[in-house]
Amino acid sequence: MTPSRVRIVDAVFAATLALLTAIAAPRAGADEASPAGPAPATQSQAIEAEKKEAEAAADKAKFLGPAQIPLQDQGMLALPEGFSFLPQPQAGRLMRAYGNSDSSALAGLIVPEAANGDWWATLEFVKAGYVKDDDAKNWNADELLSSLKEATKNQNEDREKRGFPAVEITGWIEPPVYDAPTHRLIWSALVRQIGSSGDEGSVNYNTYALGREGYFSLDLITSKSAIEADKSVARALLADITYNKGKAYEDFDASSDHIAAYGLAALIGGVALKKLGLFALGAAFVLKFAKVIGLGAIVVVAALRRVLGRAKPKAPE
C-alpha cells in the first residue's frame, strides 16, 4: 500500500466542529463537577470522542451480507456475502464524525471485508423526478469532460473556504456509458489534489440506476491503482439494486409524474448544467469529489471495518 493511499488531509468543517464539541471554559465560582461530566480539553479530543460514539452507534445498526436491505420506499439492495451496510442515521453521523458532510439523500454506506478490496461506497436516492435519458444519444465525452473540469475549477474557492484542498479533474477513468435497456449510467474521472506531486489521485466510480421518481446513486471511492479491480464490484452492486413495484423507470406516467428539471448529462456535471443555468446544482454534483479528499478512502475503510466487522447479521426492519 503506497504512502499516498494512507495520507489523510485533515478537512473538518468549522460547522462540524461546533456540533462535535461543547467546550466551555470554567466559570468563576462554578462547581468543579457537573452532572454532564467534564468537557473535553481540546477540540481534537472532542472529535475523537465523537468518532468513538459514532462507531459504537454504527456497530449496533450494521447489516451483514447476505441480506435484503430496504432502500427507503423505493427499492431493495441484495447485499452480497462479504459486504456490510450501514444505514441512516448512523451512516450520516459517522460521515460527519470523520470530517465529511452527509447528504439528506444518503441511504447508507457499503464497505467490503479485507479480501474484497480497500474501498468504500455511498448509496443515495435522489428524489429529483423522472430523468429523461434522450440526451445520451448525442452527448460528446470531450465536451462533458471540459465542462466537468471547468465546474470543478470554479468550485475550488468554495472548497477551500470549507476546509477542503483544491482539486482538479485530470481525465476520464471511464467515459460516460449509458445502458438504455437497464437505465443505468456509469462514469468515472480521476481527481487529484492540486500541488501534491506525490498524490496518485483518487477515483469516484459513479454508477446510477434511474427510476420513476428519481435515481439511485452508488459511488465507489477508491484509488487509481485499484480501480481496475474495483470496477467489477461497483457494477455488481449496482445490479443488486432493484426498484419496488411501481417505482421503476418503466412505470413512468407522463400524465401525472414529475419530470426532473435536467437530463442525464447533468448527472455527469456536464454541459446540461450550463445550458440550464443550474449552477447551484452543478456545485452539488462536483462537490461529491470532496468526499475523496476530505476523508481518505483507506482511513474510512479501516474505521468502517471496526464497526462493520463480522457478527451475527441483523434482519432489516
Image (cartoon, grey):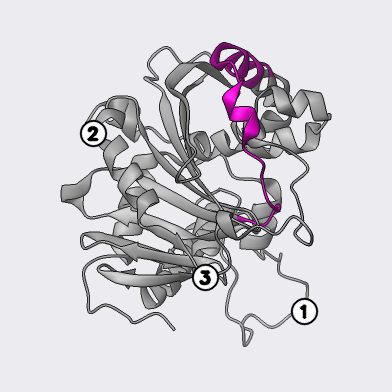
Q: Residue at x 68, y 16 (%)?
A: 150
Contact flag, marks 1 and 2 (Cβ < 8 Å): no
Camera-nearest label, 2 or 3: 3
The mark found on residue 229 in the picture is: 2
- Residue 202 picture location, percent across and down: 42, 28
Q: Earlier in the sequence, mark 2 or mark 3?
A: 2
Camera-nearest label, 1 or 2: 2
Q: CA distance from mark 1 to mark 2?
A: 62 Å
Check if residue 13 falls in the magenta segment: no
Q: Answer few, some or many: residues within 10 Å of disc 3's Cα (few below 14, many 20 plus, some between 14 and 19).
A: few
Q: Residue at x 62, y 88 (%)?
A: 35
Q: CA distance from mark 2 to mark 3?
A: 33 Å
Quadrant position of residue 28: bottom right
- Residue 13 picture location, percent across and down: 65, 45
Q: Quadrant of the C terminus?
A: bottom left
- Residue 203 picture location, percent across and down: 42, 30
Seen in the image, is 301 located left or right of residue 217? Answer: left
Q: Which residue is mark 1?
A: 29
Quadrant position of residue 198: top left
The answer, for residue 27, to whether it is visible in the render is yes
Q: Amino acid at mark 2?
A: Ala
Check if residue 138 falls in the magenta segment: yes
Q: Quadrant of the N terminus?
A: top left
Residue at the extreme bottom of the image, as rendered:
35
The mark found on residue 245 in the picture is: 3
The answer, for residue 163, to whether it is visible in the render is no
